[in-house]
Image (spheres, rainbow, N blue to C red):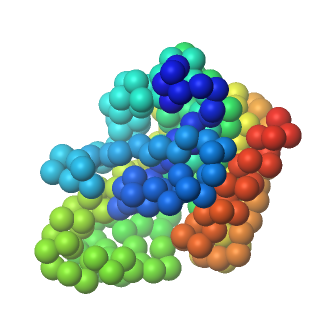
Amino acid sequence: MSAQSGERTTLLCVPFAGAGPSFFHPWQELAAGRWRVTSVELPGRERRILDEPYRNVVEAAKNEIDDIVADLGEGSRVVLFGHSLGAVLAYELAHLLSTRDVHVERLVVSGSPGPWTQRERRATGLQDEEFLARVEEFAGFRHEALDHPEMRELILPTLQADCEMHENYLPSTDTPVSVPICSLRGDHDGLVTAQEARQWRDATTGGFTCVEFPGDHMYLVDHGPQILDVIEAQSAHGRP
């Protein structure tokens, strides 16, 4: 959010594995003027599809932070939202933004165990078909583009790189963030337990809440409006 954009807070969305900014485009209309909605655009997808994808979360955050700050603008306010891989990347971005002239109001993490929990169920290193079956099992759905050979050839390397950097993620620091954290989860998520979702309490010295929605790991596909309402309600009360 630039300084010329007024006082409106930016909702900065960080995509999950294999996804790009377009997933969050409908959220701009759903936001109904409550926030400016924008997304982190990582290499290997959409406008950056020909760029080499990252395989390390901390490296991705450090390499992208300058462009993110330039887009937000000095003195801006931001709420970070990230799902699954996006949750841990958003956590790293929250640490980096704390050293810049950007005020992070809240970190909203979704479908993710706490940052210090190692991922035991893995897809990294599997052959293509077995890899896709494992990812489908994790996510609870299969993207239709993966059934088209030409699209699969474009998408698969990035999806594999995303899974690798998520499953191998280690936080850059043991120091918690100071901003409030809200952890979201689908109540039938077979990948992240309710207890794991609450581990984010230890990742902040600020306030913490945990909210569940009906659905599995990809509950957010059907609950965009409700997610935005939760973010608004918590921000309006000035507490998590």
Q: Residue at x 41, y 35 (%)?
A: 61
Q: Residue at x 61, y 42 (%)?
A: 35
In this rendering, is residue 109 above or below 11?
Answer: below
Q: Residue at x 44, y 25 (%)?
A: 69
In this rendering, is residue 143 above or below 123?
Answer: below
Spot occupied by residue 187 in the image (x, y as percentages of width and height)? 71, 73
Horizontal side, residue 191 vs residue 149: left or right = right
Spot occupied by residue 29 in the image (x, y as percentages of width and height)? 55, 56
Q: Residue at x 52, y 20 (%)?
A: 3
Horizontal side, residue 160 vs residue 134: left or right = left
Spot occupied by residue 183 in the image (x, y as percentages of width and height)? 69, 53
Of the 4 image quadrants, the one containing the C terminus is: top right
Spot occupied by residue 128 in the image (x, y as percentages of width and height)? 23, 75
Q: Nearer the viewer, residue 117 or 91?
A: 91
Q: Nearer the viewer, residue 52 or 223?
A: 223
Q: Nearer the viewer, residue 208 or 223?
A: 223
Question: Number of callouts in the render?
Answer: 0
Horizontal side, residue 149 vs residue 115: left or right = left
Q: Is residue 170 visible?
A: yes
Q: Nearer the viewer, residue 169 or 67?
A: 67
In this rendering, is residue 40 above or below 213?
Answer: above
Horizontal side, residue 239 vs residue 147: left or right = right
Q: Is residue 80 visible?
A: no
